[in-house]
Image: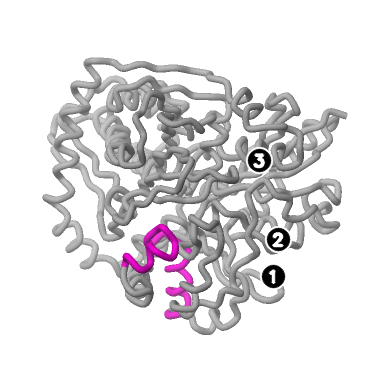
Amino acid sequence: MQQAVLGIDIGTSACKALLLSADGVLIGSETVAYGLVQLRPGWVEQDPALWVNGAQTAVQRLLAAHRSVQVTAIGLTGQMHGLTPVDAAGQVLRPALLWNDQRNGEECAQLVAQAGGAQALHGHTGNGMLPGYTGGKIAWMRRHEPALFSRLRHALNPKDYLRLVLTGEIATEVSDASGTGLFDVRRRVWSTVLMEKLDIDPALFPSCHESPEVTGRVSARGAKLFGLTAGIPVVGGGGDSIIQTLGSGVLDPGEIQTIIGTGGIVACSLDQPLDDPAHRLQVFCHVLPGKWHAMGVTLNAGFAMSWAQRLLRGFSDDDHWTYDEMAGIAAHSTAGSRGLIFLPYLNGERAPYADPELRGGFIGLTSLHRPADIVRAVMEGITYALYDIFTLMPQAGQKTHALKASGGGARSPLWRQMQASLFDCDVVTTQGAAEGAAFGAALVAGLGTGMYASVADIVRICRPLTQDGVDPDMRSGMQKGFTVYRALYPALREHLHALSQAFNEAPCHAPSARSDFPVQGGPGDSGGSTG
């Protein structure tokens, strides 16, 4: 039988499973979509049963299509920062609060004060306490759902909940732990001193491993649920936005990754942890021991594209407007979208502005603007948000010579051209970037169990697929648009906050919304995860 490693990605809008051979060839993949719930602006939840059911279906379909494959190891990845609250019996207490849930801004501010201020907190973790992080979600649950909180025994990230179902083990690894806001990224250990200051029980958090370490084996129950063989080793894996840098081959200085999944990410690998007291970039442990990861995350990338899709479908009352169709019609507009700017802050923002009360909008709209201009403005607004983060990368010591694009957005030639033109460098996609975080999870599984002997083997697997260069006319138009885009945040911040505060209690009319954007990124898919 052909030996292969299995990568499973618990994304924001779908689960993806893939098989990778010993020589790095993609054998096959399966994706199963699911939904999320938004009860109020800034609230984003998901039922963890969807992850398990999605993973079951994806894995079973994959194995049925490739019966001659023997799975030798499993790597897990998924959207980061989500709080999956579990009781002593391993039962989920409530829907998970996702990475882009912004409800806990007040609790985060209280935690920072309790820690002794932002600088004191930074001294414990190397990061701040952003509303997306798990620590603030725990504080929110403690304050607003005390009855459920009294039953909380394990605070798990999404992929680690799948690990519990698959192996019966409660464990995590350093990259996902970094995203809790309670982990010392310099020493790669839980910051128990900080937890005690914040009155958060360290026992809530799982044992933490380096990402390639074996953390358990498929149990008899897991084997029956997923159609696997009991005893297969399951490695630590990694948070999606971090593991994708490995899957894209972004390991050397000067290499930058962009991810357009549900969220958007700009990231690089580091040989030493970056000290950024302003916390405009997030600094996490890498999935490779002895390396670190710096990134900035915009909360609304593919999510904003999905919102635009639902809007257009509502106007036309049909099921057209696929993402390919949207990108196609956007090409009929011009760089700068004929003077139309889209602010993609539909669920607040994380970087470069950690501001959960930001709101989105179209600026410059006229009666002459057409659907092509609106769609292109959305794509450009997301690209502007990524570039806004990219301008922070020099402080991480990065002099960019190569940009590697990943996520569902990397499938679009127009979106790759936008990035190349605005960022002023070639944009490359690789096999790993095309397949997303599940590819990285498979690589980590192979590295941790000896199928791949070294990081050099992984770099060889991540071969280039496409390359796009700078279009001078597009660069000129987008530079003009970005100048206006960047000036709008300080000009409108106060007014956007007033809107947020005036209407924050209004429930959404549609209690469930699904993002159909291709699950390839972060925080997220992550997006982007992502991150």
Residue found 38% across the figure and 24% down from its top: 401
- List the residue tagged with mark 2: 164
Check if residue 154 falls in the magenta segment. no
Front of the two marks 1 and 3: 3
Q: Which mark is residue 23?
A: none
> Image check: 27 left or right of 440?
right
Residue positioned most to the right = 1
SS at mark 1 in the image: loop
Q: Give the amino acid at mark 1.
A: Gly
- Mark 1: few/some/many CA within 10 Å (<14, 14-19, 20+): some
Front of the two marks 3 and 2: 3
SS at mark 3 in the image: helix
Q: CA distance from mark 1 to mark 2?
A: 8 Å
- Mark 2: few/some/many CA within 10 Å (<14, 14-19, 20+): some
Identify the image's colour scheme: rainbow, by chain, secondary structure or one colour. Answer: one colour
Q: Which mark is residue 90?
A: 1
In the rendered image of this protein, does residue 20 appear above or below residue 363? above
Number of on-image labels: 3
Tell which circle, 1 or 2, labels the residue nearer the N-terminal end.
Answer: 1
Check if residue 120 falls in the magenta segment. yes
Residue found 41% across the figure and 58% down from its top: 126
In the rendered image of this protein, does residue 253 appear above or below residue 75? above
Q: Which residues are magenta?
A: 118-143
Residue found 20% across the figure and 42% down from its top: 362
Q: Give the amino acid at mark 2.
A: Leu
Tell which circle, 1 or 3, labels the residue nearer the N-terminal end.
Answer: 1
